Image (cartoon, rainbow, N blue to C red):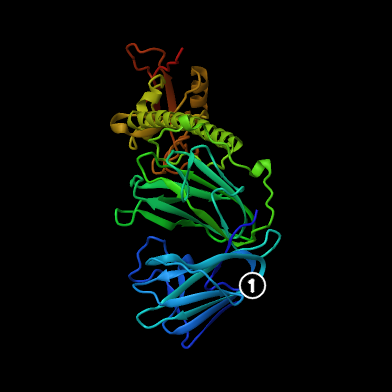
Amino acid sequence: MSRWIVVDDKAKGFNISYGGELPWMISKGMLRDSPVEGGPPLYNTLHGTNSKANISFDFTGSAFGVYGSRNSSTPRWNCTIDGKPVKHFNVSRGDNQEFCGDTVNDGTHKFVMEIDATEKEQFWFDYFKVLPPAGMNVQADVIYSPDDSLVHCDSDWDTIQSGTMTMKNGSMMTFNFNGASLSWFGVYNSSHHRGRAKATYSVDGEKPVSFWIENTSSHNMPLLSNQPFFQTPKYSAGQHRLEVVYYGNSKATPLTLQHLIVQDSSPNTPISVSPTTGPTAIPPSDTVPATTTTYTMPASESPSHQSESNSKMIGSIAGGVVGGFLFLVIVAVGFFLLGRCRARVEHPEAAFRDVIEPYTHNPLRRSSGYNPLPTSTAKRPLVLGNNQMVETTIVAPRRSIIRSLMRRFTGATFDDSRDTHNEASTLLPSRHSRTRTSASWIVMHEDSGIRVSPELPRINTDIIEIPPTYSAE
């Protein structure tokens, strides 16, 4: 089937000629006092004149139409095709008004429009519509109507006089096209509901883009046609797929489609529709609540993507649970070790309650206080009064102590002035000390009974009394 193309007033690549007594004016957007019944100008541009002027346009096709905008008043004009007059129409105030048009023999033609405008009666031209031959390949902006074979609406869409419409939440439309971008045009009708409604569009499975529609028709303007609902970004020229989903309900503004315009397209380029690029399956209409207006999942998301997302979510949850458990275990162990360290700092004597230390006496160090007997065994701390820490030793069995004392103290001479801060041993001076010489007697007590001093020489004799030694046995 052949499709209409539109040639905008600023289109390049087409033989449009603007002539007249004065240069043509260019306006962007709607005219100041123009109503919105016919929608805004195509692509928001107009060419205008306020003098005698003309427009000529060469085209190939079997039908044509000339569209523009009418302000408060309209000047006189006439149209010809190949020098022959064609009918013109009475236009209303507003944009997208058809000035003249007709069907012609399929072929190449020359269109000319003569305009007699003034400062008060200006003329504004917007675009041409042409129906090219079925086999013609021309690069242009192509119009697709709702009944085109490439436009697929599900069963929730209803046919209306100006196109198609849906009021069902979740209803979908898909469209395979060849071009770079497209525009969606709909209508507003005063007989429809006015609640604001949401819809989304997606191209080639990209993230859906939301757009809102709200019925702005009124009793004075019951039908607003050619209303642009959205314009896609520009993509690389080629084949693309559009998906539109409606998220309103029966009490909101319905989604309508009057026509689509695909930019940088060709009306007769074949478009392949494979099963992978066909319409996306959607749930039955009765499974989508009519009051639901929240977007849940893009239509392009496949079940494989959903399962992959679910598996990633489960893995994340499991990892979080295991990590939290390990963290609690580490914290508990840390508090346990910290408690033990605090107990040792606050009550260090508790570590030595079971240690039985023997009493040792060294009469040679009376002036310097307590000092343990020399020993070759390992040292360990002993807590005395006021938490004073001193060094003590684990004493060897009784025979070893007696032999050591007899060997080291008998007949030894001692120097009291020598500093002995080494806790490991008591320093004994040599026999030939210059201070004095004396003999030493060692008395080893066997028990803790009454001690009777033995008869020993008292002249130049040091008596060393050693109390009984006790073992842990």
Image check: 232 left or right of 62?
Answer: left
| Residue at 64% from the left image edge and 72% from the top image edge | 109
Quadrant housing residue 59: bottom right
Tell me where residue 170 appears, x and y as whole percent.
Answer: 47, 39
Tell me where residue 98 appears, x and y as whole percent.
Answer: 47, 66
Q: Is residue 17 above or below residue 37?
A: below
| Residue at 69% from the left image edge and 53% from the top image edge | 270
Whether residue 460 can be seen here: no
| Amino acid identity at mark 1 | His
Looking at this view, is 391 or 194 the one in front? 194
Whether residue 326 can be seen here: yes
Tell me where residue 52 appears, x and y as whole percent.
Answer: 46, 84
Looking at this view, is 394 or 205 the one in front? 205
Question: Dot 1 surroundings within 10 Å: few (below 14), some, or many (20 or more)?
Answer: some
Image check: 158 left or right of 281?
Answer: left
Number of labels in the image equals: 1
| Residue at 42% from the left image edge and 81% from the top image edge | 117
Residue position for label 1: 109
Tell me where residue 440 appears, x and y as whole percent.
Answer: 44, 28
